[in-house]
Image: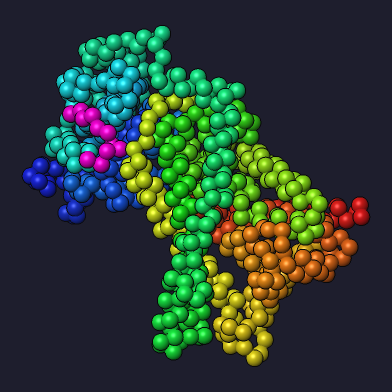
């Protein structure tokens, strides 16, 4: 038995399953650990087994994220451990694997909680069986019951190296199953296999348990692996024969060919995140918020029901339509973006290209204390910060994850581009492109400087050793499995960030609904924005931004709404001048026809900066580039690095943005 409180009982379907009861008789479900090398399909197996019954949590006492779910067939808790090549821990992620297998104090399997490791599922890569067997041998030395799942066997077979699972099971002495987790029909087979493993409690043959030194005696373990492969009769690979993956890599890893391909893929991600998905986002947002006559939307339905109840033009209508539904619209608008981005990330992962991208970008990123695996999330940030942060979650190194989360807001997302275009066309109509280009260059400089500043605190010694990447074989993603995984990731975002976005949107609505002058009631539709708590707050900020050349309430108010979403900056400016759509032109789309808006904006900057209004406009754009990202991005930062560190990051970003804007304006004024 693995636990003094355990005893056999019958499980669903008549299969005996270990159940564990802690002291006092409280039932604790069996615990199954999924262990394997990176990129072996372990997470796909986890999704197959647990479905939607899963959550992402931090391993106890760490910031390492681990997926925990439940298998309905076995009534077991399933923990998807971080990928590792060895139990000689070299990173916090790998240490979590070692501690969980050992049942260390405070870990998922701390015996004091009544839990233990009831079964270890070692996921073996059929295309790299030697490497997988080495980890399997180390895990076996922990003395845990175990079974093995073989993945990627279809790819190995295409290369002439099919794994005989019956022979492998006979040699190892444990049950072995070859499974393609990308096929949903494998779900029942996999869960039945785990139930059998819980009942049999099998141990690896030929390995003496040594839980205190699982990674020692390397020569002994390699000798065991060599003998095991000899018993399987696996032929030596013909070094002269190139695999399909090798042939593809001759192109994609070639500096002259691979880098242009990489740039083209990044351009595609950028276009999807920054431009192409925009109309779909507007459609989702409009479903909740559109009040156009005849439009099919939740807002129109709510307005009709409120009118029947006699609550039209009341604070109730404002709260529900202008507050709750607006917040839901913001969340909904991000759903198609997140789904498409997660889909593209999943396709790159499942095809095997993600590791190649890290290899290509490693030399460049290493100069700023990171490695090549962060280059794709950072580049995606120029399309949208939110999916960029979502991609950061796939990075295996926790310290590099933190740094990347902190510097990602300095990548200039597409939502900021419309602001750049509008202000540049008003003040620099003949040099608009140069101004926008300069802002993007500043964005790159801020990313580099941010990483260098954070390096002594987080990544000082992270890149001393070369990046060790095992390039997985190329494969064809299975569309149903990929869509399912994409949906789970997208839904995780909606549950996590959505609540924060709606809450903060309501805060903004409340501020805009509180009158600061007599003659208006709470949430009065006729209440001018400048006479609300929102407008009063914006006017309170005017002195703070006076040294930066844009201390004028229309601009400071726009910056306030920009915290919720950068897309609202221009609409806030338009609304604050009480302009209708005809008078505002196509300002919100970054178009050339700005109607009567340019004269009003120029007057505002002249009021704040006098003859130095163009410098004030540039300082405003610098602040827009460098200050706090949108609320959705902040919410995702909270999910990944916690509220305390995110709060500190937001404060630092505001201070840095203010110093840059003030410094630029004040120094520039000396030359006028």
Q: Which residue is depicted at the point 76% across and 57% down?
A: 425
Residue toward you, 234 or 540: 234
Residue drawn at (79%, 55%), measured in percent from left and top? 429
Image quadrant where residue 335 sits? bottom left
Q: Please, is residue 570 above or below residue 45 in the view?
A: below
Q: Which residues are magenta?
A: 175-185
Can residue 103 be seen from the camera position used here? no
* Residue found 60% across the figure and 46% down from its top: 382
> Magenta stretch: residue 54 in it?
no
Image quarter where the N terminus lies is: top left
Q: Position of residue 185 (x, y in %)?
A: 22, 40
> Residue drawn 58% across and 88% down?
521
Foreground residue among 431 and 568: 431
Q: Position of residue 37 (x, y in %)?
A: 37, 30
Name the quadrant containing residue 162: top left
Q: Report the magenta stretch's main SS.
A: loop
Q: Seen in the image, is 436 located left or right of residue 393?
A: right
């Amino acid at each position: 038995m693995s636990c003094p409180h355990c005893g056999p009982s019958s499980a669903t379907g008549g299969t005996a399953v270990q159940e564990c009861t802690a002291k006092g008789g409280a039932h604790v479900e069996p615990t199954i650990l999924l262990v394997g090398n990176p990129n072996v399909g372990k997470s796909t197996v986890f999704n197959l087994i647990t479905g939607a019954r899963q959550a992402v949590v931090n391993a106890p006492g760490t910031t390492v994220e681990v997926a925990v779910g439940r298998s309905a067939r076995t009534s077991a808790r399933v923990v998807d451990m971080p990928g590792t090549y060895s139990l000689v821990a070299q990173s916090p992620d790998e240490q979590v694997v070692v501690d969980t297998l050992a049942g260390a104090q405070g870990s998922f399997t701390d015996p004091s909680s009544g839990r233990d490791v009831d079964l270890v599922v070692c996921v073996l890569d059929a295309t790299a069986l030697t490497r997988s067997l080495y980890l399997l041998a180390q895990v076996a030395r922990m003395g845990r019951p175990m079974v093995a799942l073989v993945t990627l066997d279809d790819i190995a077979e295409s290369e002439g190296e099919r794994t005989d699972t019956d022979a492998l099971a006979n040699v190892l002495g444990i049950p072995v199953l070859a499974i393609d987790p990308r096929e949903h029909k494998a779900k029942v087979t996999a869960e039945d296999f785990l139930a059998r493993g819980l009942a049999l409690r099998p141990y690896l043959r030929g390995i003496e348990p040594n839980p205190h030194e699982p990674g020692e005696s390397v020569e002994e373990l390699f000798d065991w692996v060599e003998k095991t492969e000899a018993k399987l009769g696996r032929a030596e690979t013909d070094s002269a024969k190139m695999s399909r993956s090798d042939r593809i890599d001759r192109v994609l890893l070639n500096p002259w060919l691979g880098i242009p391909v990489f740039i083209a893929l990044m351009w595609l991600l950028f276009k999807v995140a920054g431009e192409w998905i925009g109309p779909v986002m507007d459609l989702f947002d409009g479903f909740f918020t559109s009040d156009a006559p005849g439009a099919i939307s939740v807002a129109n339905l709510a307005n009709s029901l409120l009118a029947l109840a006699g609550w039209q033009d009341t604070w109730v209508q404002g709260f529900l339509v202008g507050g709750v539904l607006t917040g839901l619209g913001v969340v909904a608008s991000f759903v198609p973006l997140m789904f498409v981005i997660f889909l593209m990330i999943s396709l790159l992962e499942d095809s095997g290209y993600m590791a190649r991208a890290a290899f290509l970008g490693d030399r460049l990123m290493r100069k700023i204390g990171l490695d090549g695996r962060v280059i794709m999330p950072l580049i995606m940030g120029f399309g949208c910060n939110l999916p960029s942060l979502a991609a950061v979650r796939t990075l295996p190194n926790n310290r590099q994850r933190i740094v990347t989360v902190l510097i990602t807001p300095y990548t200039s997302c597409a939502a900021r581009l419309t602001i750049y275009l509008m202000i540049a066309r008003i003040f620099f109509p003949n040099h608009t492109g140069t101004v926008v280009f300069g802002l993007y260059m500043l964005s790159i400089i801020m990313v580099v400087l941010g990483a260098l500043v954070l390096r002594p605190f987080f990544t000082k010694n992270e890149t001393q050793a070369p990046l060790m990447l095992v390039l997985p074989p190329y494969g064809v993603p299975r569309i149903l499995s990929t869509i399912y995984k994409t949906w789970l990731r997208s839904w995780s975002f909606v549950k996590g960030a959505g609540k924060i976005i709606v809450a903060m949107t309501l805060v903004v609505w409340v501020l805009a609904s509180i009158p600061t002058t007599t003659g208006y009631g709470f949430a009065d539709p006729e209440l001018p924005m400048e006479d609300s708590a929102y407008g009063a707050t914006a006017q309170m900020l005017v002195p703070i931004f006076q040294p930066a050349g844009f201390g004028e309430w229309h601009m400071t108010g726009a910056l306030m709404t920009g915290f919720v979403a950068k897309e609202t900056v221009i609409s806030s400016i338009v609304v604050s001048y009480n302009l209708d759509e005809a008078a505002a032109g196509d300002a919100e789309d970054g178009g050339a026809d700005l109607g009567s808006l340019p004269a009003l904006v120029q007057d505002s900057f002249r009021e704040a900066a006098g003859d130095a209004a163009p410098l004030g406009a540039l300082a405003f754009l610098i602040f827009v580039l460098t200050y706090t990202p949108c609320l959705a991005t902040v919410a995702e930062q909270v999910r990944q690095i916690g509220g305390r560190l995110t709060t500190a990051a937001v404060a630092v970003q505001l201070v840095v943005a203010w110093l840059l804007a003030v410094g630029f304006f004040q120094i520039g004024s000396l030359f006028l």
